[in-house]
Amino acid sequence: MFDLLLRHARLVDDTLTNIALQDGKIAALGDVDGPALKTIDLRGECYVSAGWIDSHVHCYPTSPIYFDEPDSIGIATGVTTVIDAGSTGADDIDDFYTLTRQATTDVYALLNVSRVGLIAQNELANMANIDADAVRQAVKRHPDFIVGLKARMSSSVVGVNGITPLERAKAMQQENGNLPLMVHIGNNPPDLDEIAERLTAGDIITHCYNVSRTVFFGLTASCAPR
């Protein structure tokens, strides 16, 4: 006997199917024979898919500026895995890790290269916050939780430091097994050319479609040189 049987579920290709679940896993698909403890007829009105993955969220609930609860933006919306994009640095990553163990949603983290994380908008304005040893120790403590690094490279974040925080971030990336590096872009400086020429394969640029001075595509959809 199955635990749950979903009848007439609509898939992303618009076909209808039956889905039987047992012990939290799909046990049968299509023409399903056999009883179930619970049967729900979706009547073709609901789409069913595998859990979604959101690779850019901010779900450290005690952050003072960007925050959500992991499960409210995760499992409650059909997203089963989220990656927090730099809400915490080395100073708060332990607390964040502990909080995520209470969530149903699978949570991973990009570690902010500023040890203080997002406690303010200008976490990279003070170069003393970029502590390579603190990053190294954090990655060592949480190798299965920290899946990359995050550097926010816009003028409101870096202050007078220009491109230097990104150069430090790239060095820390190499020191920590070439973890993926996500780079936030925003208002100049530094400009996009300065940022792009320092990135390597596997790096990620985020907010590239945001309406700001630093964008890849203009209103005519022409691609910027890089």
Image (cartoon, rainbow, N blue to C red):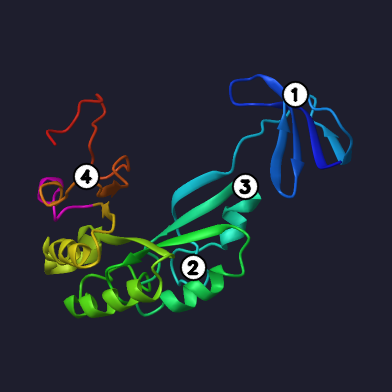
Name the secondary structure under disc 3.
helix
Q: Residues within 10 Å of mark 4 (few under 14, many from 20)?
A: some
Q: Is residue 145 magenta?
A: no
* x, y percent for residue 2: 82, 41
Of the image marks 4 and 3, the number of the one nearer the N terminus: 3
What amino acid type should be assigned to the residue bearing mark 4? Arg
Within the image, what quadrant is residue 101 found in?
Answer: bottom right
Contact check, label 2 and label 4, Cβ < 8 Å = no
Contact check, label 1 and label 3, Cβ < 8 Å = no
Residue that label 4 marks: 213
Of the image marks 3 and 2, the number of the one nearer the N terminus: 2
Q: What residue is rendered at 34% in x and 74% in y?
A: 140
Within the image, what quadrant is residue 103 found in?
Answer: bottom right
Within the image, what quadrant is residue 147 found in?
Answer: bottom left
- Quadrant, the C terminus: top left
Alpha-carbon distance for marks 4 and 3? 32 Å
Q: Which stretch did the figure color magenta?
A: 187-194
Q: Is residue 80 above or below residue 125?
A: above
What amino acid type should be assigned to the residue bearing mark 3? Thr
Of the image marks 2 and 1, the number of the one nearer the N terminus: 1
Q: Residues within 10 Å of mark 3 (few under 14, many from 20)?
A: few
Residue placed most toward the observer, 10 or 20: 20
- Left or right: residue 41 versus residue 168 is right
Alpha-carbon distance for marks 1 and 4? 45 Å
Q: Residues within 10 Å of mark 2 (few under 14, many from 20)?
A: many
Residue that label 2 marks: 60
Residue that label 1 marks: 44
Residue that label 3 marks: 77
* x, y percent for residue 44: 75, 24
